Amino acid sequence: MSYWVIPSLALIMALVLLLPFSIKRVEEELEIFLLVMGCAAMTLSGLWNRHIVKESFVEPINISIAVLVAGFMFRAGRNKIENAIERLEKNIGLNHSLFALIVFLGFLSSLITAIVAALILCEVISHLRLDRPSRIRTAVYACYAIGMGAALTPLGEPLSTIVTAKLQGPPHNAGFFWLANLLFLWVTPAIVAVAALAAYWRPLGRETSTSSVSDKVPDTNKAVFMRAGKVYIFVVALVYLGEGVKPIANKLLSALEGWQFYWLGLTSAALDNATLAAAGIVPSMGRAQILSFVLSLLISGGILIPGNIPNIISAAKLGVKSREWARAAIPAGVALLVTYFLALAVIY
């Protein structure tokens, strides 16, 4: 590999992290931008082959179909969903309803997958008629909860599937509940904390009657297909970006140890965290090392839209821009990262 490949890949990562916040057109066409960056990374790394191209076309299919089917199902059941939300809100209030929903979806995502949990979340948020700041804040904090809760079983998300598969042999002999045993006591406080932030930290605003009229119109067929298409392109882009930057990821991972692994997880804010898990998790790692790295990946994945699938789905459905997402997500992400780093340092 040429000496300039690693710096070039580092530049691509810097562009992925910075341009969506500095150029409005990039922010508006984020999935196309990431696709271009992913293709550039693949070309620089010289990793183009038939297998990766096939994987990039196949991997997003299930996610996109889920988004498409859910769009039509939720549209058909719109009145029932609205009635159920209204009853729940009437019985326990908006704030308590939102708190309970986020905690519930956080843990349930480990069984119904993060994709389905995110789709349910978006539909509920849409029907709550929250104003834009409250809607964004709720989506961001709920996606933190879903991303962390989904990691409790191999069913929840690709990261947990990969980690379980890589550790299923000696010395860890990871089974279906291995990650739940490792993570449950750690992610539970975070799920409760982000749910509380969404529901109670700031007053929840409602849209005015004039601003919510357009929201009462069900999605058109075109809108449902367009949203599924955007998610498809997003996932294709992340496949290429993740594969393309593997040389720099492998080089960094091989040179790091201890606490450095934890902070390397920050890169999963812009990369698929499953890619970093696949590159970084090895059976020779101790339980504490695995816990530290996985927690970092899960928290960092909530910071930016490309960090995990729930973010991508929610941003597409609710129309959240990169700067809006980061503005709400970074303070919570930094607080969680520092808190868990200090906790891990004290305990281990």
Image: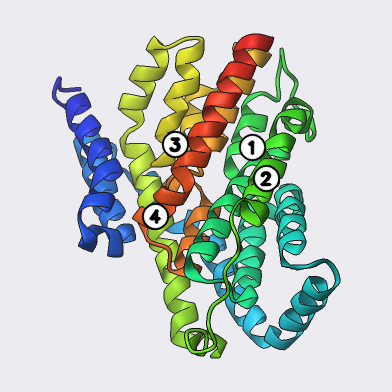
For the residue carrying disc 4, how many other residues have a C-alpha within 10 Å: few (<14), some (14-19), or many (20+)?
many
Q: Which quadrant of the rendered structure holds the C terminus? A: top right
Residue position for label 3: 268
Q: How many angstroms separate mark 1 from mark 3 (CA)?
A: 14 Å
The answer to whether the residues at label 1 and label 2 have Cβ atoms under 8 Å apart is yes
For the point 42% across and 12% down, which residue is it?
Answer: 256
Q: Earlier in the sequence, mark 2 or mark 4?
A: 2
- The answer to whether residue 31 is left or right of residue 94 is left
Residue position for label 1: 160
Q: Which quadrant of the rendered structure holds the N terminus? A: top left
Residue type, numbered disc 1: Ser
Question: Element type at marker 3?
Answer: helix
Residue position for label 2: 150
Residue type, numbered disc 4: Val
Nearer to the camera, 232 or 268? 268
Note whether 24 is above or below 291 in the view shown. below
For the residue carrying disc 2, how many other residues have a C-alpha within 10 Å: few (<14), some (14-19), or many (20+)?
many
Q: How many angstroms separate mark 3 from mark 2 (CA)?
A: 16 Å
For the point 62% across and 48% down, which residue is it?
Answer: 197
Nearer to the camera, 46 or 38? 38
The image shows residue 302 at horizontal and vertical percentages of 51, 44
Nearer to the camera, 246 or 196? 196
